[in-house]
Image: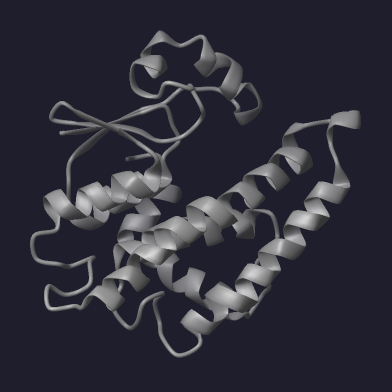
């Protein structure tokens, strides 16, 4: 059984439900503002993530992994034997690279923008909160939307085509996070895409249900 330690880890939970994998989730019942300090003092979290950052930590049959994108790709390699959430077995190197692009782009470019803005908007207070950082990150986010997300979704229902894939789990989490900041415009390409993802059972179990 999969074990996810140090939560929340909605991407991994969503992926596990899409693949039909049993999982056990262990989370700290604390507010985001308190998470880093609590995790730094948690011996259990240090066993898995050396920096004790608030991010997915994962164990599967003795294998311990960190970083949600890495975990999602591992789940594909180990459990998606019929290529349900991966490019078809006959896909070429270019198609597979286009698929993997979304894992790196969201994790390296988009997620840091959103997390930093979230911290300054909802967690930090007084002089520690910086409205300029929020606006700067918002501008960079909408640049990413126009340059990357919208072109990919203009002609297709999902991020790499008409077929839902693990790349949609990676991207969908990011766009859902952006929507909580109010950074997804109503009736936009992204809003319609997110609405499609929200109809999936795996999404609902990961984000909208207390029964994981």
Taking depth in this image into account, of 30 and 116 the one nearest to the observer is 116
Q: What percent of the width, then of the height, locates residue 37?
A: 60, 16
Q: What percent of the width, then of the height, locates residue 128?
A: 84, 30
Which residue is pictured at 40% across the width and 36% down the height?
56
Side of 158 where 112 appears, left or right:
right
Q: Is residue 178 above or below residue 185?
A: above
Residue 67 image-quadrant placement: top left
Side of 80 where 46 appears, left or right:
right
Side of 62 where 113 appears, left or right:
right
Looking at the rendered image, the quarter that the C terminus falls into is top left
Taking depth in this image into account, of 98 and 201 the one nearest to the observer is 98
Farthest residue, direction front: 93
Residue 120 image-quadrant placement: top right
Q: Is residue 169 above or below residue 148?
A: above
Q: What percent of the width, then of the height, locates residue 144?
A: 62, 69
Residue 183 shows in this picture: no
Q: What percent of the width, then of the height, locates residue 64?
A: 25, 29
Which residue is pictured at 17% across the width and 41% down the height?
22
Figure label count: 0
Farthest residue, direction left: 81
Residue 81 image-quadrant placement: bottom left
Side of 120 where 212 appears, left or right:
left
Q: Is residue 13 above or below residue 55?
A: below
Looking at the rendered image, the quarter that the N terminus falls into is top left
Residue 70 shows in this picture: yes
Farthest residue, direction right: 127
Which colouring convention does the figure follow? one colour
């Amino acid at each position: 059984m999969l074990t996810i330690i140090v939560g929340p880890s909605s991407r991994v939970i969503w992926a596990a439900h899409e693949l039909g994998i049993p999982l056990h989730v262990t989370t700290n019942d604390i507010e985001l503002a308190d998470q880093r300090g609590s995790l730094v003092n948690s011996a259990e979290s240090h066993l898995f993530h050396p920096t004790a950052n608030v991010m997915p930590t994962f164990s599967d049959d003795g294998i311990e992994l960190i970083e949600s994108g890495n975990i999602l790709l591992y789940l594909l390699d180990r459990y998606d034997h019929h290529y349900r959430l991966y490019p078809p077995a006959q896909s070429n190197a270019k198609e597979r690279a286009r698929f993997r692009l979304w894992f790196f782009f969201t994790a390296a470019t988009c997620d840091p923008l959103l997390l930093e803005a979230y911290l300054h908007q909802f967690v930090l207070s007084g002089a520690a909160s910086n409205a300029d950082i929020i606006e700067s990150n918002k501008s960079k986010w909408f640049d990413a939307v126009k340059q990357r997300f919208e072109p990919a979704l203009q002609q297709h229902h999902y991020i790499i085509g008409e077929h839902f894939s693990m790349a949609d789990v990676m991207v969908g989490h990011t766009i859902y996070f952006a929507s909580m900041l109010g950074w997804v415009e109503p009736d936009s390409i992204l809003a319609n895409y997110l609405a499609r993802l929200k109809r999936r059972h795996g999404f609902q179990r990961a984000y909208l249900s207390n029964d994981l």
